[in-house]
Image: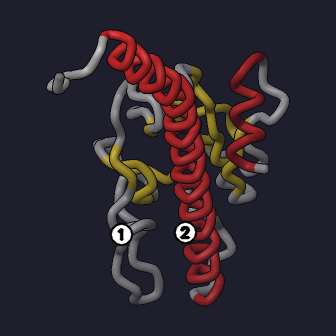
Amino acid sequence: MKRYGFTMIELVFVIVVLGILAAVAIPRFSATRDDAEVAKTRSDIASIRASIVAERQSRLLQGSTMFIDKLHDNANANLFTGTDAGTLIPAVVGVPARPLMQYGIATRANVNGHWQPGPVAGAAGADGRATWNYTYLMGGVNVVFTYTPATGTFTCNRAGAGNAGVFCRNLID
C-alpha cells in the first residue's frame, strides 16, 4: 500500500524542530538590532564631534578662537545643523554663512534609536555661554549629551544614574 501523506508524528517532529530554531534565532536578531543601534549612535556622535572640530579649525584660520554656540537650528527639525545667535554660522572675514553639518540629523520624538527634538539650554559655562543638552532615546532611557561651547566638548554623563550611565558608557567608550 502506498502512502501519500505524512503521519502525525512526522508533523509534530517538524513543528518541534521549527520551534527550537525560532527560539534560538529570534534573540540573535534582537541582539543584532541593538548592536546596529549602538553602532549608528556611535557614528552620529563621531560625526558631531568631527564637525565641531572642523568648524573650530575653520574659525582658527579666520582668527577666531570661539567654538560654535549651539549645534541645532532654531526650528529643531534637524539637530546638529549649527547656529550662532539664531542664525547659521555667520559670515566671518568674507566666508559665507553655512551649516555645521550639511544635512543634520533628523529627530523622532519618543522613538528608540533616535535623537529627541527640543534641545534644552543648560547652565552657563566658564565663558558665560549656555551649555546645550541633546537627548538620545536608547532602550526606553533618555541619554543626555551636553555640548559645552566654552570647550567644544560633546559628551554624556558616564556616571549617570541607572541605565543612562551604562548606555552612555556603551556609546562613548
Secondary structure at badge 2 equals helix
Quadrant in the picture for residue 77: top left
- Give the residue displayed 50% in from the left and 37% down from the top: 29
Q: Amino acid at mark 2?
A: Ser
Q: Is residue 5 left or right of residue 82?
A: left
Which residue bears the numbered disc 2? 51
Q: Amino acid at mark 1?
A: Gln
- Give the residue displayed 35% in from the left and 69% down from the top: 102
Q: How many marks?
A: 2
- Give the residue displayed 73% in from the left and 51% down from the top: 127
- Give the residue displayed 39% in from the left and 28% down from the top: 111
Which residue bears the numbered disc 1? 102
Q: Is residue 96 left or right of residue 25?
A: left
Q: Quadrant of the N terminus?
A: top left
Residue 60 on image: x %, y %? 65, 83
Q: Is residue 118 visible?
A: yes
Q: Does residue 51 lie above or below 83 as drawn?
A: below
Q: Is residue 3 left or right of residue 47?
A: left
Residue 136 on image: x %, y %? 53, 35
- Cα–Cα gap, marks 1 and 2: 10 Å
Q: Residue furthest front?
A: 1
Q: Is residue 135 visible?
A: no
Query: Mark 1 and 2 residues: CB-CB less than 8 Å, in contact?
Result: no
Q: Is residue 27 left or right of residue 17?
A: right
Residue 103 on image: x %, y %? 33, 63
Instruction: State the residue in front, 107 or 134.
Output: 107
Image disc number at residue 161: none
> Considering only order in the chain, which callout, 2 or 1, is on the residue closer to the N terminus?
2
